[in-house]
Amino acid sequence: MDDASIDVKRAAREAAYSMPLEDINPVDPQMFRDDTWHPYFERLRKEDPVHWAKSEEEDVGGYWSVTRYNDIMAIDTNHQVFSSIPTIVLPDPAEDFTLPMFIAMDPPKHDQQRKTVSPIVAPPNLALMEPVIRERAAKILDDLPIGEEIDWVDKVSIELTTMTLATLFDFPWEDRRKLTRWSDVATAAPESGIFGTTDPEEAEQKRRVELFECVDYFMNLWNERVNAPPRPDLISMLAHGESTKDMDRMEYLGNLILLIVGGNDTTRNTISGSIYALSQNPDQERILRANPDIIPSMVSETIRWQTPLAYMRRTALEDFEIGGKTIKQGEKIAMWYVSGNRDETVIDRPNDYWIERPRVRQHLSFGFGIHRCVGNRLAELQLKIIWEEILKRFPRIEVVGPPKRVYSSFVHGYEHLPVVIPTRN
């Protein structure tokens, strides 16, 4: 870490502990781009673990921040009181642009739609996908230049996960990077710059245009698959599924965005996070290279350490007391997974990247309860494979500059990560 980064983080810690507690607003995306979020959540866990915040954003307004592991678990596993409707992010959906998706539904509809697509990530299908993923990972790595600076995010993380996602959809191969773009468009903050403007209204209009292009593209694929015998790809599953075959255009788009973001964004950010984490912890990299059998443990630790989705929202269906506070019916709750995964009262050495951690799968990154990530095993599989193939080829991967992080308080990830591979095995 360079001196400038150290100064920024020192200033953030001073600010986090000097400002009035009620002024802490964790949903600020700049904290995540600057990687200065840690002390704010540390203070909330210690002093106000169920914290009422008021955002200046009109579509966010007031909300509860829940920051301790056990409180998050209690809410995440209680869908009878804490609903996923109308959305899993803090901004409320616009009345004229609401995207229903099964992660933002409650039973029974949630269960029916989730069951429609879950066979694609069941163990028998993962066993079929593993050699395909391995072959692609090997080719991606073999094509990387030696001794030249590259962007690991673009060349490896995005490429591998987008290939996998294209296979799940049976999506036209030559257009697969459209999936990457639509994933970014769906989750980006209006001020992030990816829309070519930082004006929120103009950015939102551009987002809608691109998402309508997404659903139009997928409608063509739907029409092909609905008129053909059922096949084991996500579009065919949706087109023929009893609970999904009559979806309207916006619900189809909502479920597409869920599957695209869930199948691409989170895994790619954990792949990038593994490279960055090991570069910052060379002792852990030495342990890994000396014993590749602990790759699965390293994968789970990276998923905890990175926490690729920082939070999930719920909405209270009735008054509920937790942490000495009463959450009122209709109020929003942000379950900060990124904070629960650093909870000192539950996780030993929570700020350390510790790849031999006991109970290494004890993390919140996949959620719990009925909404636990349906593709968690596929995510772990891709990470395991890419690292098995990396260790066969590269004795070193050098991070040669600071990462550029995503401007978002929801997606916790990387836009760019400059690396050099100095040599091959």
Image (spheres, rainbow, N blue to C red):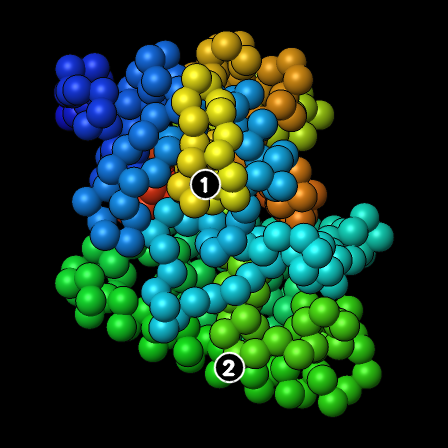
Residue nearest the observer in this picture, 344 or 149: 344
Which residue is painted at 53% across and 79% down in the image? 249
Callout 2: 10 Å neighbours few (<14), some, many (20+)? few
Residue nearest the observer in this picture, 112 or 421: 112
User: How many badges with numbers are in the image?
Assistant: 2
Percent position of residue 125, x then y: 80, 56
- Compared across the picture, whether 377 is left or right of 28 comes to right
Residue nearest the observer in this picture, 170 or 74: 74
Q: Could you tell me the amino acid type at mark 1?
A: Gln
Which image quarter is the C terminus in?
top right
- Compared across the picture, whether 416 is left or right of 18 comes to right
Which residue is painted at 62% across and 52% down in the image? 106
Q: Which residue is mark 1?
A: 329
Q: Could you tell me the amino acid type at mark 2?
A: Tyr
Percent position of residue 259, x then y: 57, 60
Which image quarter is the N terminus in?
top left
Percent position of residue 224, x then y: 67, 87
Give residue 67's quadrant in the image.
Answer: top left
Q: Residue furthest right?
A: 124
Is residue 356 depicted above or below 75 in this figure?
Answer: above
Which residue is painted at 46% across and 54% down in the image? 87
Which residue is painted at 47% across and 66% down in the image? 99
> Which mark is drawn over residue 217?
2
